[in-house]
Image (cartoon, rainbow, N blue to C red):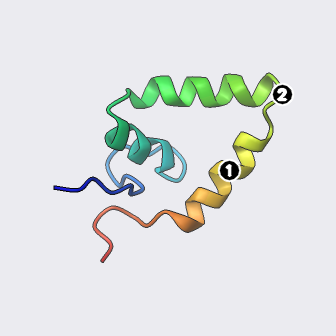
Amino acid sequence: MKKKLYRSTRNRMLGGVLGGLSEYTGIDASLLRILTVVGFFLGFGSLGLIYLVWIFIVPNEGAA
């Protein structure tokens, strides 16, 4: 079965992007969230822009 990236409906804080990425990669969602926030504050401000873009591009879990 081929894995697909979806925004999580069960494991979401804001848009479900990192929850879905967590399910796709197998990495804990809390770790991804911490790394994203730390990266954002360390000067990788593009992470916030990428997150916003993914909210609109990546479909919700269960969407056809």
Residue at 48% x, 42% y: name it. 18
Marks 2 and 1, how far apart in space? Answer: 14 Å
> Whole-percent x and y of residue 26?
32, 32
Residue identifier under label 1? 50
Image quarter hosting the C terminus: bottom left
Left or right of 57 on screen, residue 42: right
**Quadrant of residue 48 within the rendered picture:** top right
Q: Is residue 53 left or right of residue 59?
A: right
Q: Which residue is mark 2?
A: 43
Coordinates of residue 37 in the picture (x, y in percent)? 66, 28
Point out residue 10 in the picture as x, y percentages from the top left corner.
31, 48
Task: Look at the picture and state if 25 lies above or below 20.
Answer: above
Q: Which mark is residue 19?
A: none
Question: In which quadrant of the rendered view does residue 42 lie?
Answer: top right
* Residue 46 image-quadrant placement: top right
Task: Point out residue 4 in the picture as x, y percentages from the top left corner.
Answer: 33, 57
Q: Residues within 10 Å of mark 2 (few under 14, many from 20)?
A: few
Identified by mark 2, the residue type is Gly
What's the residue at 78%, 25% (across, down)?
41
Query: Which of the two labelled residues, at mark 2 and mark 1, occupies the earlier sequence position?
Result: 2
Q: Please report contact status of discs 2 and 1: CB closer than 8 Å, yes or no.
A: no
Mark 1 residue type: Ile
